[in-house]
Amino acid sequence: MNQDESPAHTVRAVLIENHTFMRQGLLEPGALPGINVVAAYDTIDPLLNRHVDIDLVILDLHLRSVHQPDATQGKAAIRALSGAGYNICLYTEEEHDWVLGLCMGFGASGIVNKSDTQEDTVDAFMRVARGERVLSDVLAGTAELLAHHGQLKELTDREQQYLHLRARGLGPSEISKRLFVREDTAAKASRKLADRLAGYFGTTNFADIERAMGLAPGDILYRSELL
Amino acid sequence: MRRVSRSRSLSFRQLLIELLRIDRLTAQSWARDASEVAERGMMIIFVMTRLVIMASIILATPSILGNTRSAPMTIILGGSALAYSALMIIAAIKQRELRAAPWGYADVAVCCVALVGSAVLFPQFADGGPAAGWAGPYAVNAAAASGVWTRRYVRSLVAPCLVGGVYLFSCLVLSSGRKDYPAIAGFVLVCTAFGIAAAAFAYFWRHLARTSDEYRDILVREEKKRADLNIHPIIGLLRALADPETRAGQLPGLRSEAAFATGQLREFLKVPPGLPARDAGSARQLEQVLREASAGLTGIRVVRNIGLARSVDLSPELATAMQDALRVLLMNVTLHANATKLVMHASADDQSWEVTVHDNGQGFESVPASFGYGLGTQVIDELGRHGVNVIVWSRPGEGCLITMTRSHEEGGNSI
């Protein structure tokens, strides 16, 4: 999608980000082709005070700063926005796979790294805006790890083949060629795996997650201030 | 491996020094070919033993002059043996080794003439007593020397047998005096056996030296290869840093690579060429190797899905090879692939482990001719030497996927 498309197809989004220049940058027309960032805030409060008619919330995981040390962020922010009915895509530099997985479990539908390309970023935002869950490269690796340890049950052979290639960085187009399936079939498998992953992280206790992912006991509770 | 022996002239002063300081031969063994040192060693042994024979000729001549049929002929015979021995010693010193032609053959001929002449001139030649003259010891020395200058082992058995045969013929046929048959038989045996023993010694001594040279060549070759492997990517790095067209966004990553390369170069320069390679360190985990190899990359998003290979240990040599190969791979991606994302993946099962590196860059035709020195030599060949199979998949516009696999059995790595 590009800027020439009709406004009816343009995704309306709100950015929650504590970096001033980032907020100003994404508010510029054309910063994200096909996505109209209608507002940008440094906290989630404006979206909770009144419901805004938007397709997507682009949410930074870290919102606290010296100016707003008590800002709601991380798990609390995701849960609050998800509970208010927003589609959430995290926009973050967080690298820990277990943190990102838990964010999916708390209610985020997608995760975009701030160093991802514009094309990948817009693609993920669009899909989340449509109500899909998106399996990022990091989470594909996490899903493969959990499947290997028997935590993601009832995966079909095809889904396992998809996961095998997706975790190695291949996109839907390359995977469809290798598995001799249509691209939308590969995309469907990706959505299904993202749903499974979100379901796993949303319903499994921390101790089991730590054990499955090879973390030390207490890592999830004590190693991230976001949770 | 064929080794060409080099002859370098040696002055008499140098010879004297070397005769007195034989230990220098071994002290300098790494500085020259072992084959050359072996030849010099045998030459020096010959020179020393032949000098003893020459001394014995001089000492024996007065006593045998009283028992000879012809004093002038005896002097001529002894003088000829002395003169030829002196010439042969000079030639050997000049050439720094014993040569077969013409000196070796001539030495056997002189020896045979001495045996025949002594049998004719000295009536007591065949009775084994002290008046038998100097031809016997000379024959033993010549037979032993022939075992050295004849380079082929089977052929080297001929000269001692010939000398023994001529001695036997001289005693039994030409000598007119009393014959001590047990002494004659014993001497023939000694003469032949010493020749054969010297030939066997020379054969194994040369074999040992040749093997040593081959190993040294392998070491030198490996050292050169290691230099290529270490220095080649650093040159590429320096070139990229010096290139004014290098994008500013790449500079932080290049600087980080340069800092790492500085350490590599320092480590490399610690090891003098021709000596065994550096201390490879201790075993490391595959996960650690992957993280270290991809640390500091900027200008590209790096995703590491390597949790499935956490328990894979690599031997020190394999860990070093993997880290070097990965750094070459990642540097290629950073500099040439125009990629924005790179995904490293690692997994393992009971039989093998696998590492993949995928980038979303411009890709290329994945035919061996397009791999170049980096991918072809530094990655595929080098990892292949450690039992790692490398598969490259790429198409123009579709990025590149490199898969490295290795079974646990090859090299004793454990999961």
Image (spheres, coloured by chain):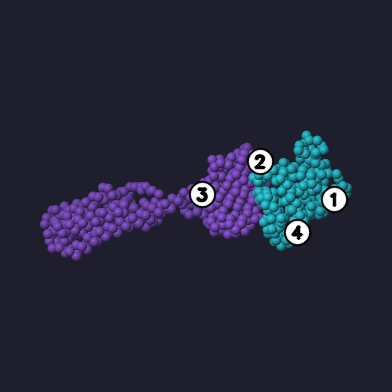
Chain colours: A cyan, B purple
Write down the chain letter for disc 2.
Answer: B
Disc 4 marks which residue? Answer: A204
**What amino acid is at disc 2?**
Ala
Cα distance between the residues tagged 1 and 3: 62 Å
In this rendering, which labeled residue sits more in front, label 4 or label 3? 4
> Which disc, if any, is residue B369?
none
**Crowding near pointer 2: few (<14 within 10 Å), some, many (20+)?**
few
Toward the top, the furthest residue is: A4
Same chain for the residues under marks 3 and 2 in the image: yes
Write down the chain letter for disc 4.
Answer: A
**What amino acid is at disc 4?**
Thr
In this rendering, which labeled residue sits more in front, label 4 or label 1? 4
Identify which residue, A99 or A21, lies in the foreground: A99
Disc 2 marks which residue? Answer: B248
Same chain for the residues under marks 2 and 1 in the image: no
**What amino acid is at disc 1?**
Ala
Q: Secondary structure at mark 1?
A: loop
Label located before the other in sequence (3 or 2): 3
The answer to whether residue B171 is left or right of residue B12 is left
Give the quarter of the figure containing the C terminus of chain A: bottom right
Write down the chain letter for disc 3.
Answer: B
Label located before the other in sequence (4 or 1): 1
The answer to whether mark 2 and mark 1 are in CB contact below 8 A is no
Tell me residue B6's x, y (percent): 36, 47
Disc 1 marks which residue? Answer: A84
- Residue drawn at x 21%, y 59% is B136
> Which disc, if any, is residue B226?
3
Cα distance between the residues tagged 2 and 1: 43 Å
Same chain for the residues under marks 4 and 2 in the image: no
